[in-house]
Image: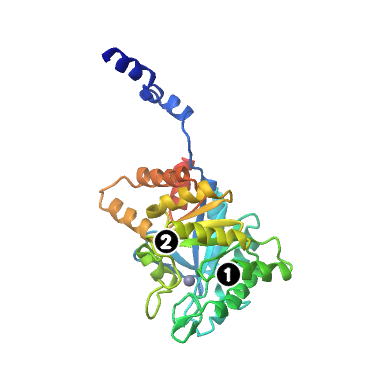
Amino acid sequence: MTEKKINLAESHRLRRLRGSKFLRELVQENDIKVSDFIYPLFACEGQNKREPIAAMPGIERLSVDLLEKEIHELASKGIKSVLVFGVTDRKDAQASQAYAQDGISQRAIHVIKESCPEMVVMSDVCLCPFTDTGHCGLIENKRVANDSSLELIAKTALSQAQAGADVVAPSAMMDGQVAAIRELLSSSGYQDTAIMAYSAKFASAFYGPFREAANSAPQFGDRKSYQMNPANLREAMREIEADIEQGADIVMVKPGMPYLDVIAHARSEFDLPIAAYNVSGEFSMIKAAAERGWIDEQAVVKELMLSFKRAGTDLIITYFAKDLANWLNN
Ligand SMILES: [Zn+2]
């Protein structure tokens, strides 16, 4: 009995492959590289404006005239993609600035694409930064209306494609939004514009700092009638499946860190590229702890990114993209 136990141990000495750095690297299953990361950019109105976001150290809103320099800096670090958010005080019931040809997002996309054509420009498609209510759709009978919002969401996506976006990223969690966008893009000659769907977007407390950044907090109620219940995994698979059927090219899980199980399940069920959004609250927690000297920021962030890759993520949207590029390039 004892002899058998010892033999078993001999055949299962997993430490054998951990003995040296090179050996560990040879058998490493996952890796992170700068091209995994998408950097979110907040574009604001005005000239020569840099507005720091209090809860997100190092992240700023930039006026459109500063984007050229910013995008060259990102490209020089090896970052290959940005996700654009427009921030404005010009809000109304119809979210008209969401789809205005000279809207803040459209101007930002245009400048980025002009100054760095090879940069993959993704743009957030939602109404909440532009509605006077701060909700992601139009309000009818005191409810966020689904179907009447679709037309404006599709118009927003088309206007961004026309401004030069390579990938439009609908984040409103309205049913049918991917189909509405796909249809309008295709019938308008933009059949090559890709859609990255915020498919499994949960109603999360981790979005807190972002709402300051994007000036998009809802003026009443919350977003639980359209964003997903954090308790639901099977429903997340239904959301993802629906978006794939409607023509999504990339599907997303948001937030990332507390939803790695959702990513892993999606990876086992679907073959499309999967994006994870490492959201503002995840970023702020790590920054705050690092500022106090409680954790080693670089080690923690690299480990977190590796966890996204291990779970099955292909693309990671993260405010750490610049920091990661600096760390990985040196
Ligand atoms: Zn929204």
| Above or below, 235 relative to 9 | below
In the displayed structure image, the side of residue 330 where residue 12 appears, left or right: left
Residue 329 or residue 101, whichever sits in front: 101
User: Splitting the image into 4 quarters, where does residue 177 fall?
Assistant: bottom right
* Residue drawn where x is 46% and y is 48% of the image: 264
Q: Which residue is mark 1?
A: 176
- For badge 1, the amino acid type reads Gly
Circles 2 and 1: CB atoms closer than 8 Å: no
User: Splitting the image into 4 quarters, where does residue 124 fall?
Assistant: bottom right
Residue 327 or residue 262, whichever sits in front: 262
* Residue drawn where x is 43% and y is 85% of the image: 142
Residue 233 or residue 131, whichever sits in front: 233
Local crowd at mark 1 within 10 Å, few (<14), some, or many (≥20)?
Answer: some
Local crowd at mark 2 within 10 Å, few (<14), some, or many (≥20)?
Answer: some
Secondary structure beneath label 1: loop
In the displayed structure image, the side of residue 146 where residue 3 appears, left or right: left
Residue 315 or residue 58, whichever sits in front: 315
- For badge 2, the amino acid type reads Ile
Q: CA distance from mark 2 to mark 1?
A: 33 Å
Secondary structure beneath label 2: loop
Q: Which mark is residue 295?
A: none
Q: Point out the tag, 2 or 1, that comes first from the N-terminus.
A: 2
* Residue drawn where x is 37% and y is 56% of the image: 282
Q: Position of residue 176 (x, y in %)?
A: 58, 69
Q: Is residue 69 visible?
A: no
Q: Position of residue 111 (x, y in %)?
A: 61, 66
User: Splitting the image into 4 quarters, where does residue 57 fall?
Assistant: bottom left
Q: Which residue is mark 2?
A: 59
The residue positioned farthest toward the front in the image shown = 1
Q: Is residue 245 visible?
A: yes
